[in-house]
């Protein structure tokens, strides 16, 4: 019986991971190619203005629906019983937050040194209303491992966003092209999601359910708000201290360094919370699941972060052009941050699945406080390079040890996690030696990028190829 239960859990997880992987790869490849085109149609200042609007949007999305929708993933009974109450809370909070965005946009844009972003903030934050409407269907899809639905929804988003954004950018609409493109894509994506999930928003309200949902969700909303602050305080500091052009360069570097998070972590996070929740009462199985997901994430993440850090100059100049070369100063260090974020996000989902939402709140608060102290110093002393160094140092020396300590308190063995990382880490060291050797022998160029990437991957492959069985064990 136990074996059958394990198999019943693994099958949906593996299938969902496959759909999630396909979805994420298509989405990120499409957004990457779009970014390449836009980098040659727009200037760093346009990206800086858009970054200001994006900071506001990320802030309100982190607090939207007050964290209650995640309860649909781990609710022990029929989640559709609480869906109407979740929908009511989500829509109500999104309306209030959008009102704050509308009236606060001028002050925020001015504070970040980009008054021109006021209108763009108001436009882009309409996405908050869409997010509130679709909160319940989106989380039910995640609970049921229906990542095929997410795939179709996100592909529709990608096609519309890309088409609208590139068309407007090519006709001289600047930063507004990014805002209108994202909004159009989100509208279509929401319609497709609700249709395929067979669940249109139906508000309702149960006072007892609402109280329980808020007890669960508010700490998560607080933690998410702190995650926003932690991941965007560098934008605020860069824009305020260094200006819109520096912010545009930093944004491009941060976007590249976030590829491991946006691709590999995104693939796993769509199923990790539900997978951890299914084994939350079995200490042995939950540790095994955490170790296997750690291995699964480490294999691509370590190599990609290595390439981003060691080949930053040829990568940026080849892909985006010489006008963006100054972004290299930040990318070299932000690549380290990307690797740490991948692991910490997995730990975050693990702790949430165990019901330790208050602990995640304290962890994100620690991260934020450390950044508030370190980032201004980095900006003043080292331009965007200093900001990146400060962010990476806080992640490695403050946040990572804190998360490891939290895992130990839940009974997780650090030795087991070390074993899960041993082969990818050894392979990364060997690959780094190959890449550094080629970088010393060749000047920065597309040839160096291709040659070092290929030979580094060949050096890395023998260490990680045997680990492919870990994916099958998850499924």
Image: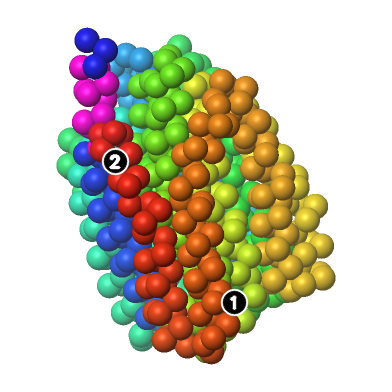
Q: Which residues are magenta?
A: 4-14
The image shows residue 77, relative to residue 270, as above or below, that is above
- Tell me which residue sits at (74%, 73%) in the image: 383
- Tell me which residue sits at (46%, 39%) in the image: 420
Compare residues 322 and 91 and report the one nearer the observer: 322
- Residue 381 visible in the shown view: yes
Q: Is residue 147 magenta?
A: no
**Label 1: element kind:** helix
Relative placement, left or right, of 331 versus 172 is right
In x, y percent, where is residue 100? 58, 48
Compare residues 43 and 81 and report the one nearer the observer: 43
Query: Which residue does the numbered mark 2 point to in the structure image?
Result: 469
Relative placement, left or right, of 110 versus 17 is right
Compare residues 371 and 451 and report the one nearer the observer: 451
Query: Which residue does the numbered mark 1 point to in the structure image?
Result: 328
The image shows residue 438, relative to residue 11, as above or below, that is below
Q: Is residue 13 magenta?
A: yes
- Residue 38 visible in the shown view: no
């Amino acid at each position: 019986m136990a074996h059958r239960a394990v198999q019943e859990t693994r099958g949906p997880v593996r299938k969902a991971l496959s759909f999630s992987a396909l979805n994420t790869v298509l989405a990120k490849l499409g957004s990457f190619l779009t970014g390449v085109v836009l980098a040659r149609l727009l200037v760093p200042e346009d990206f800086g203005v858009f970054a200001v609007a994006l900071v506001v949007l990320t802030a309100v999305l982190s607090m939207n629906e007050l964290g209650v929708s995640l309860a649909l993933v781990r609710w022990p009974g029929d989640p559709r019983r609480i869906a109407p109450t979740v929908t009511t809370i989500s829509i109500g909070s999104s309306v209030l937050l959008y009102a704050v965005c509308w009236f606060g946009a001028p002050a925020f844009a001015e504070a970040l040194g980009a008054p021109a972003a006021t209108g763009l903030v108001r436009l882009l934050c309409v996405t908050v209303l869409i997010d509130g409407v679709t909160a319940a269907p989106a989380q039910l899809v995640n609970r049921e491992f229906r990542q095929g639905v997410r795939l179709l929804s996100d592909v529709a988003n990608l096609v519309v966003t890309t088409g609208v954004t590139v068309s407007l950018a090519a006709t001289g609409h600047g930063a507004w092209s990014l805002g209108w493109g994202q909004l159009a894509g989100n509208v279509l994506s929401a319609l497709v999601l609700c249709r395929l999930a067979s669940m249109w928003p139906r508000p309702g309200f149960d006072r007892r359910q609402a109280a329980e949902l808020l007890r669960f969700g508010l700490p998560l909303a607080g933690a998410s708000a702190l995650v926003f602050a932690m991941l965007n305080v560098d934008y605020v500091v860069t824009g305020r201290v260094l200006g819109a052009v520096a912010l545009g360069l930093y944004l491009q570097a941060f976007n590249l360094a976030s590829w491991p998070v946006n691709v590999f972590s995104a693939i796993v996070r769509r199923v990790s919370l539900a997978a951890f929740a299914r084994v939350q009462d079995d200490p042995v199985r939950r540790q095994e699941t955490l170790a296997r997901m750690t291995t699964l994430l480490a294999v691509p993440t370590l190599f990609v972060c290595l390439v981003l850090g060691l080949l930053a100059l040829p990568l940026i100049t080849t892909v985006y052009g010489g006008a963006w070369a100054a972004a290299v100063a930040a990318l070299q260090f932000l690549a380290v941050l990307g690797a740490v974020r991948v692991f910490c996000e997995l730990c975050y989902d693990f702790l949430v699945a165990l019901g330790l939402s208050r602990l995640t709140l304290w962890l994100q608060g620690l991260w934020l406080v450390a950044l508030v102290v370190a980032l201004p110093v980095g900006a003043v002393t080292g331009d965007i390079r200093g900001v990146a160094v400060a962010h990476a140092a806080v992640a490695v020396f403050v946040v990572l040890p804190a998360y490891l300590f939290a895992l130990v308190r839940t009974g997780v063995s650090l030795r087991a996690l070390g074993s899960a990382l041993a082969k990818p880490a050894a392979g990364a060291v060997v690959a780094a030696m190959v890449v550094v050797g080629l970088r010393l022998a060749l000047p920065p160029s597309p040839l160096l990028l291709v040659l070092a990437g290929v030979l580094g991957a060949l050096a890395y492959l023998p260490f990680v190829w045997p680990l492919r069985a870990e994916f099958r064990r998850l499924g």
